[in-house]
Amino acid sequence: MATSGKNRAFPAGFTWGTATAAHQIEGGNTNNDWWAFEHTEGSGCAESSGDACDSWNRWEEDADLVAGLGLDNYRFSVEWSRVEPAEGEISRAALEHYRRLCGGLRERGIDPVVTFHHFTTPTWLTAQGGWESGVAVERFARFCTVVAEALGDVMSRACTINEPNIVATMGWHAGMFPPGKTDVDLSRTVAGHFIDAHRLSVDAIRGAAPGVPVGLTLSMTDYQLAPGGEEQLTSIRHHAEDIFLDATGGDDFLGVQVYTRMLIGPDGWAGYEDGVPVLDMGYEFYPASLANCLRRAWAYTGGALPLLVTENGIGTTDDAQRIDYVRQALEGVLDAIAEGIDVRGYTYWSLLDNFEWAFGYGPQFGIVNVDRDTFARSAKPSAAWLSSVAAANALPA
Ligand code: GAL
């Protein structure tokens, strides 16, 4: 590896965290578009999210786990359909729940990193046309004001919309997320609405919670050129990444989320190279993708924003493979930092084995296993490994 013989320490102040999302762990989120989709015949969903990890009730156990690992921060999302179960009707109890979570994390020495939208939209809003008609843009900004007013003094960082590029593509082009449509033009319209919503929500959050750093968390893929793919590569990067990166000017940070690479040929994705390891969900095992995407984000934005890895991880039943993946990905982060790229932190996806959207509970991204019947949590060796890296703020020799 290129880093051998180099300093394996991360810069002072580099932050370590782990992430989850409301719908994937809370359970019983029956009032959003995902729940409806999970229960739609023919949607392709493996199963219902059901009780998920019961984290709505067991959040203290989760906070204890993060504290036990000695991580600096915990990234989670607020569930819009709980906070605003009907249009304009705000649940003070739900807001109070998230205040308790933030407070409980702080008491344990953990910075709460709050995501305002992580894939799910209330069904009252989708019924109005949601992201498709664009009515969601203003509604989302209004929701952000409410949440930022409630959590402004207890949250450490705000992430507006999680992977709007994935939501638009998977929901309106690939048909694998709600509403399950396959209309590329519509997916681009939706992407435009998400971009508008990001800009408005940054203003809303700053207005209600001045001083809290705000940014976008974008899914990036290490798109690589296969013979003849030049035009496709430019087009894919433009629609999947660049238009979103263009919307981050003036933000406080850019959250980069990376899982794999894809080879792009004249017809788009060119498939796997012979013999490469492919994981359960179809991702190629390619830890170098993280550093490559950090380089691209940094170059594209001209170094205008500090970068945070807000998600990186691997769905595997082989926990040794997880450690290997994260170690190699972190080697790449060290390389990127050595090249002068301002990377401020690393967040592993995910704390828990949880509801992996259309794939259900099959893929295991967690450093902590959750028993599907009892919800008992048990840390895997990768949790201890990540904990030791965070404590040393360095990779082991
Ligand atoms: C991301 C998403 C997470 C999680 C992860 C693993 O795209 O933000 O919610 O599902 O992928 O596939």
Image (cartoon, rainbow, N blue to C red):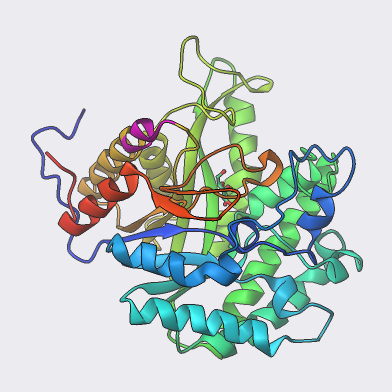
- Residue 325 is one of the magenta-drawn residues: no
Vertical relation: 94 (above or below) 158: below
Residue 351 relative to residue 148: left or right: left
The image quadrant of residue 77 is bottom right
- Which quadrant of the rendered structure holds the C terminus? top left
Taking the spot 37% from the left edge, 80% from the top edge, the residue there is 106
Residue 381 relative to residue 363: left or right: left
Residue ranking furthest to the front = 374
Taking the spot 28% from the left edge, 38% from the top edge, the residue there is 327
Percent position of residue 280, x then y: 56, 28
Residue 295 versus residue 2: which sits nearer the camera? 2
The image quadrant of residue 16 is bottom left
Taking the spot 50% from the left edge, 9% from the top edge, the residue there is 274
**Main structural element of the magenta stretch: helix, strand or loop?**
helix
What range is drawn magenta here?
318-323
Residue 361 versus residue 222: which sits nearer the camera? 361
Vertical relation: 78 (above or below) 336: below
Residue ranking furthest to the top = 274
Percent position of residue 155, x then y: 45, 80
Percent position of residue 146, x then y: 65, 86
Taking the spot 59% from the left edge, 35% from the top edge, the residue there is 234
Can see residue 160? no
Residue 255 versus residue 176: which sits nearer the camera? 176
- Which quadrant of the rendered structure holds the N terminus? top left
Percent position of residue 40, x then y: 88, 47
Residue 383 versus residue 172: which sits nearer the camera? 383
Can see residue 326? yes
Marker count (numbered): 0
